[in-house]
Amino acid sequence: LEGYVNEPSDTGIRTVLENFWSSWSDLSKDPENVTGREILQENAKALVETFNELSRQLSDLDADLTENVDVKVTEANSLLQTISSLNTEIRRIESLGDDANDLRDQRDLMTDKLSKIVNINVADSELGYQITMGNTNLVQGGTMTSITSQDVETAVANGTLTGGEIHGMIVSRDTYVSEFRQQLDTLANTLANGEFQVTVPAGWVKPGTTVATTAPEVVTVQGINGLHKLGYSLGSPAEQGEDFFTFKLGATGITAASITLNPTIASDANKIATSLRTSTDGAGVTTVVKGNNGLALLMSELKDVKVSFDETAIGGGITSAKIGDFYGAIVGALGVQSQEMNRIYTNTQTQLDQVESSRQSVSGVSLDEEMSDLIKYQYAYSASARFMTTFDQMLEKLINGTGVVGR
Amino acid sequence: MSLRVTQGMMHLNMMRNLNRNMGQMASLQEQTATGRKLNKPSDDPVGITYSVRYRTEISGNEQYQKNVDSAISWLDFNDTVLGQANEVLQRVKEFNYAIGVNSTLDINLSGNQVFGADDPAGTGNNVFSVLDRVIAALDNGTHSAVTSEIPNIEASMDRLINARSEIGARTNRVELVQNRLADMEINLTDMQSKTEDADYEKLLIDAQINENIYQASLSVGAKIVSKSLVDFLS
């Protein structure tokens, strides 16, 4: 996730947002200049494309995680199969009186691998290993129950599956990735439709009227779309500005994946509204005062305005923050989560090493121990061999040496 | 720790420590290569929010500086034009330039301000009306009419001079803002650097220490792991 977000850098969302605000500011210096308009158009396209791209990468990540869960489930099933058949095999061999140590080692190895994938409890019974996950019997003697992806998803949901790789993948997908996507969607939607207040300077001709205001007026607007509609584009007769951002075909609202520049604006830079004034001549024809840059100025100042971010739909509250600050908060939260995970990982790794060491201490082979044992037994062998020689000589003396008087 | 220490345990230990040292070296190397100690959000979660804000403000500042430079050149141009008093700006262009957060500056003067109120009848104080009357009087040869226009001409000249001094005052204000923006840029860059950048001396010393530790762990590990009782039994 940190890699996709790519902050701090000069290529992330922060930079395209800044370029967007800067191009409004440049346009405000010369509102009729076609170059300025085209540049704004391109920067707006870059902005929506960055949102779209990031959203696409996140949904790819989501699909990846789901696919990985499937792969792990298949692996778990094959391990379960192996363990259950080993159970049968070991029982058969040992009931014949032979040693099945190799097979037991193999079974332990399989169980270790399985415990990495899902959290299991192992009990050794006379039928072999009995493996349970929560309340479900996975292996009992020679019979196994296979698990499906659906099973693991329900198990995570009701708290049976609490550890292992599968649990980790499902939690990443459903908590971290999805939360980040929702915040990104909120950012995109608020940029287009979030509520905030602007002070429109005197001299504004409200769309639908012909008389200019005489005092500055505080207006509540809904996002850049709303602000854009307060002014007029370069068309003649005067045309009110349209929605600046819309959503793509097939979507139902503006999200990071569906946000796009209004196609009319994307094809005609003159539809960008920059002016707040019109003049009506005697015949009642209203033309826009092209040189007025009031709306372009308001747009460029939007980066410092507190906008209302509504997260009630995803369980949050309503925050009032500048757009840049909200983005910074998302990135900061991601940083905290990532840092926390690293810390937990390091701690858990240490614990794992401890457990492994203890196990090795009991079951591991120490070369020095074995070598000294080897020496010991070798000497014991020589000593008993020497002992046998003594006996041999004694017996020889006894058998061949006694009773030879007169031979 | 435990009563039996086996080869397996020592091997595990060695691998774990080697891995940890390598990880340290990798992260120090990343910091040295980028020159920043804040390379991803998890390096410093609070710092990253500051960093995003400083970068945004620095780029806003750059934009304001661009606007200020362009405002100054327009004001100079206005000054030159008024100084020659040759052209008439016909279109009512209103330019408000953004020179700071929520602060804008008008950089033009309307024709009415410079030349006097609109006067279609030709009888008012508009400089053109005055000049028209002087021309007519000279054509007619009525010197008294010319003399009576002199106060009007002086009033027009005063108006022009006022306009120029207004432009001068605005230029002063804009230059002040320019200096302030330049100072702010230095401050913001300083703060951003404190949050993001790595202290090179410390980094290099740390990297060297780490490298020594790594080499030591490698050589000692090799010695311990490879020898056992077998080598000494002949």
Image (cartoon, coloured by chain):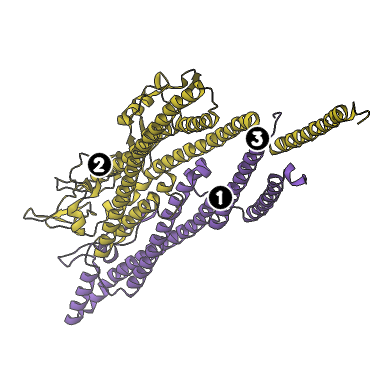
Chain colours: A yellow, B purple
The answer to whether B191 is drawn above or below residue A316 in the figure is: below
Q: Chain of mark 1?
A: B
Judging depth in this view, the residue of A254 and B221 nearest the camera is B221
Mark 2 and mark 3 lie on one chain; the one further toward the N terminus is 2
Gap between marks 1 and 3 measured at Cα: 45 Å
Q: Residue at x 20, y 39 (%)?
A: A252
Toward the right, the furthest residue is A406
Q: Chain of mark 2?
A: A
Q: Which residue is mark 2?
A: A254
**Three-letter amino acid code of the residue under disc 2:** Ile
Q: Which residue is mark 1?
A: B37
- Badge 1: how crowded within 10 Å, few (<14), some, or many (20+)? many
Question: Is A110 displayed left or right of A145 in the figure?
Answer: right
In the image, are marks 1 and 3 on the same chain?
A: no
Q: Residue at x 42, y 26 (%)?
A: A84
- Badge 3: how crowded within 10 Å, few (<14), some, or many (20+)? some
Task: Tell me if I can see residue A287 in this picture.
Answer: yes
Q: Residue at x 45, y 25 (%)?
A: A87
Judging depth in this view, the residue of A164 and A144 nearest the camera is A144
**Three-letter amino acid code of the residue under disc 1:** Lys
The x and y percentages for residue B186 are 53, 56
**Three-letter amino acid code of the residue under disc 3:** Val
Judging depth in this view, the residue of A65 and A299 nearest the camera is A65
Judging depth in this view, the residue of A182 and A278 nearest the camera is A182
Q: Quadrant of the C terminus of chain A?
A: top right
In the image, are marks 2 and 3 on the same chain?
A: yes
The x and y percentages for residue A353 are 60, 34
